[in-house]
Amino acid sequence: MLPTRTQLAQRLSNLQELIRHPDQLNQAGQTPFEIIAEAGIARLRHYPAPAGVDTRGKQPIVIVPPLAVNMYIYDLFPQRSLVATLRDQGYPLYLIDWGRPGRREAHYTMATYLQDFMPRLLAQVRAHSGQHKLTLHGWSIGAMFSYAYAALGDPDIDRLVLIGPPCDYHAPNMQNRHLAKPLKALQERTGWRVDKSPQALWHVPGWVNALGFKLMSPAGTLRGYAELLRNLDDRRYISAHATNAAFLDDMVAYPGGVTQDMIRFLITENVLAQGRLPIRGCDASLASITARVLIVVGDKDPIITPQASGKLIGLMKQAHCEMIQVPGGHMSIVSGSQAPRHIWPQVSAWLDGKSAASAAPV
């Protein structure tokens, strides 16, 4: 059936608003927070507990995001907000916002984040909360930052929640594994290594990261736009699309030094799978981690596969590890539409001292 003139007018009006005023449709970022500290361009957020929520006896949780993403991912919709969920469960809640690096920050490396920013910001969490033992909650590269920081020797990292954590970049089905051989061959034949070139050359703008994320699943991206065209008369759908776009279309840059470290240490040398850290001259080992660890992997994650994450368990020999596999891809396992029902309750159960799997929905 052809749409009526009224329906066509509504669709055109919704499309115009989506193009001209997407910020008015965006539902993300509504949970209140305060900035309590800074380190370089990074800022530390604190999410105050609402009136009536008792935080006594709860260990502070620090959310450690990956680089290249904006913070909307943790507060995407009012009914689908990880920060609001953890805050309302009574956890003193903090989040590290890594900021937006430009070319002036091209010299930032993995060490900048792990050995400079994180110690300074976690010291502020301890001063603000009055507690020394902390839980780090990391996703993707943020998960790697979390366990790498624990490996550097902070004795009061008590628990690690690792969502889609990278480890073995040469594991089967990892998309970057085929780059290792040619990069090693180039190094052996010419002596060239990525970190022998200027860091500014390796600055990756945010729009490139956004495009790359979408190209990970081009069919899914096209389906999303097709669904948008079919639902232009549904204002709630338009608002949801604008909210997701506020995250997906506004990625953050990778500093050049970080890009170099990723190519050398993660993709070429695969140091994490050897229990080492992606820091020059660092002899810290994943074997020294003694925290309780929950690893959450997505069964359809094309970016960090379950096999790539699972390698961690054998490397963290002193840690008490539990690993669960949940439905979803790399983004959906942290904030997808099914996460509040199928994933977050398992994490909450584990934080309460139970097995995460015991909270899996039937």
Image (spheres, rainbow, N blue to C red):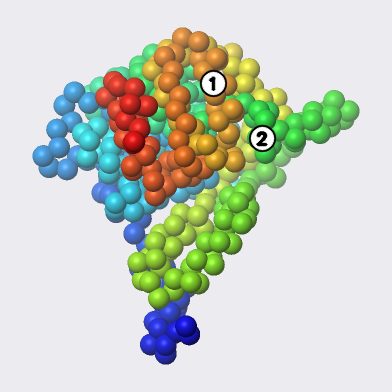
* Label 1: how many Cα within 10 Å (few below 14, some 14–19, many 20+): many
Q: Give the label, 1 or 2, closer to the camera.
A: 2
Name which residue lies at 50% across and 36% down: 298
Query: Which quadrant would residue 171 be assigned to in this image?
Result: top right
Please give the name of the residue rendered at 54% of the width and 65% of the height, measured from the top-left corner. Answer: 225
Q: Residue furthest bottom?
A: 5
Q: Secondary structure at mark 1?
A: helix
Horizontally, is 55 left or right of 5 in the view? left
Residue 85 coordinates in the image, percent (x, y): 27, 41
Q: Quadrant of residue 219?
A: bottom right
Category of crowding for the residue at label 2, using alpha-carbon neighbours closer than 10 angstroms: few (below 14), some (14–19), many (at least 20): some
- Image point 84% across, 29% down: which residue? 185
Task: Residue under label 1, please give it.
Answer: 312
Q: In the depicted view, which residue is nearer to us: 317 or 343?
A: 343
> Which comes before the other along the chain, label 1 or label 2?
2
* Residue 198 visible (yes or no): yes
Q: Foreground: 134 or 44?
A: 134
Is residue 173 or residue 163 the one in the foreground?
Answer: 173
Q: Is residue 148 left or right of residue 281?
A: left
x and y, in percent, of residue 301 in the image: 55, 39
- 264 with respect to 19 (left or right): right
Amino acid on which the number 1 mark rests in the picture: Leu
Q: Which mark is residue 231?
A: none
Q: Is residue 196 visible?
A: no
Q: What amino acid is labelled 2 in the image?
A: Asn
* Residue at left offset 79%, top offset 30%: 181
Q: Give the Cα separation between the discs numbered 1 and 2.
A: 17 Å
Can you say which quadrant of the picture contains the C terminus?
A: top left
For this orientation, the residue located farthest to the right is 189
Circle 2 residue: 173
Q: Tell me if 51 is positioned left or right of 175 in this view.
A: left
